[in-house]
Image: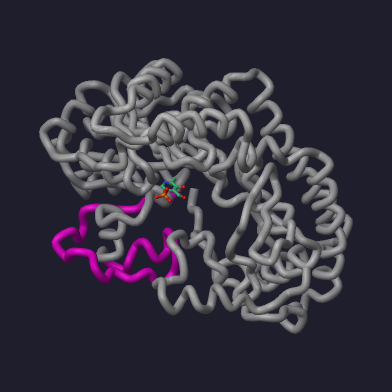
Amino acid sequence: MKLNKNKNWIYAKNIIPGGNMLISKRSDFLLPDYWPSYYKKAKGCFVWDLNNNKLLDMYFGVGTNIHGYTNNKIDKRIHEVIKNSNMSSLNSYDEVLLAKELIKIHKWPSMAKFSRSGGEANAIAIRIARASSKNKNIAFCGYHGWHDWYLSSTLNKNNSLSNHLIPGIDSSGIPRQLKNTAFPFQYNNFEMLKKIVKEKKIGIIKMEVQRNYYPKNNFLQKVRRLATKNKIILIFDECTTGFRENLGGLHLKYKVYPDMLILGKALGNGYAINAVLGKRNIMQAANKTFISSTFWTERIGYAAALACLKEMKKKSFFKKIIKTGKYIKKGWSELAKKNKIKIEITGIDPIPIFNFENKINIEASTYLTQEMLKKNIIATNCIYVSIAHTKKYIDLYLRELDKIFFKISKNKHNLKKLIKGPLKQRSLKRVN
Ligand SMILES: Cc1ncc(COP(=O)(O)O)c(C=O)c1O
């Protein structure tokens, strides 16, 4: 497609602070000024922009649609729900069925609550854990949403979230009283966590099981033991890693079990649903506090999750996703070698990520996104693999990537000149 300045996005920024609702879908983090930004429709692994350009999506949002866009089997169930009303004075029994299913899959939890977004689910989990625990402070690793409990760490000495998430993140709007209530720790740095636990009256540890890096030296087992020894509630935020490699949270693979668990994203194939699971003695503390919301009773998310689970229970489902992720990683590695450029490949197989060497990373990835878009491909340096990403489309993408890597290799020192608009901003740093 021909790259044109996106006037719709420029207009949106005038009437919507930041331009949209999710930072990872902002043009500024992808291809400032030229990103297509808006879609008309999406199907399988394709997206049509407002100018009817059909784009192969090798980014895939933030990993919501693991079954592909507008998946017939899941959407059939949603159409039935709409036909029979997605809301009423009574509750939808689908929420009970979903709680039952998720408890059955994970075995260790005995109760569940639900929300629409991951940030909300994280806030629910923290509220319940704080209501249940004597110590109220939190040690956390990774990204867990936008709520005050999390952002309060920007009030700590040296703005600890600046190193952990995005540089320069501000503490505006966060009550000063929350200072020194949440403390970040680095993934695989057990000594750091141990020191925080010793010094900061920690009652809750919240972390992703894994993101970009694999756990080292029994890190997860050590965290579990530390939590148990100090009567700390361990929460795994598997909003993104859940239902990615296996049926349920990734912790099932590592056989390390938390006290509470958050699941989301892949659970509903784009329909809004997040779950908080936990042990009975902790979850019952929800009754001591106030947690309630109108649209948490809306039926679509629950029905979508139940339909997704049915698909994900098929034996080949996760095998296919992992196989595709491995194939992409292998392709990246071979193309980098062939074109003599250095890249670091990380991420679990269903969410492969690569970075160029530090000094050219931002220029090279902006250039990559720009050149891919010219070929009608949406691409960054991370792919949320879906079942719709078949070999045919990945090979097509890799053929284009080969040409782009070649150009990057030849123009390492003057990439900026080849970029039409401003450079993309550094996106969320994933420290785990
Ligand atoms: C681990 C984790 N927790 C929480 C969130 C926030 O979820 P949401 O954007 O649905 O509020 C995300 C989103 O990227 C996430 O990856």
Q: Could you tell me which residue is drawn at 18 percent across and 64 percent down?
A: 175
* Residue 395 relative to residue 47: left or right: right
**Compared with residue 5, is residue 36 higher up or lower down, i.e. above or below?**
above
User: Where is residue 427 shown, x and y percent of the image?
Assistant: 53, 63
Q: Residue furthest front?
A: 83
**Compared with residue 13, is residue 207 higher up or lower down, i.e. above or below?**
above
User: Where is residue 144 shown, x and y percent of the image?
Assistant: 38, 49
**Compared with residue 102, is residue 415 higher up or lower down, i.e. above or below?**
below
Q: Could you tell me which residue is drawn at 25 percent across and 28 percent down?
A: 90
Q: How many marks?
A: 0
Q: How is the image coloured?
A: one colour
Predominant secondary structure, magenta span: loop
Res. 402 visible in picture: yes
**Compared with residue 268, is residue 178 higher up or lower down, i.e. above or below?**
below
Q: Quadrant of the N terminus?
A: bottom right
User: Where is residue 32 shown, x and y percent of the image?
Assistant: 60, 74
Residue 20, magenta (yes or no):
no
Q: Residue furthest left?
A: 288
Q: Depth check: 338 or 75 in front?
A: 75
Res. 354 visible in picture: no
Magenta range:
157-186
| Quarter of the rendering containing residue 413 | bottom right
Residue 158, magenta (yes or no):
yes
Q: Could you tell me which residue is drawn at 29 percent across and 33 percent down?
A: 88
User: Where is residue 209 shown, x and y percent of the image?
Assistant: 46, 37
Q: Residue furthest bottom?
A: 417
* Residue 7 relative to residue 233: left or right: right
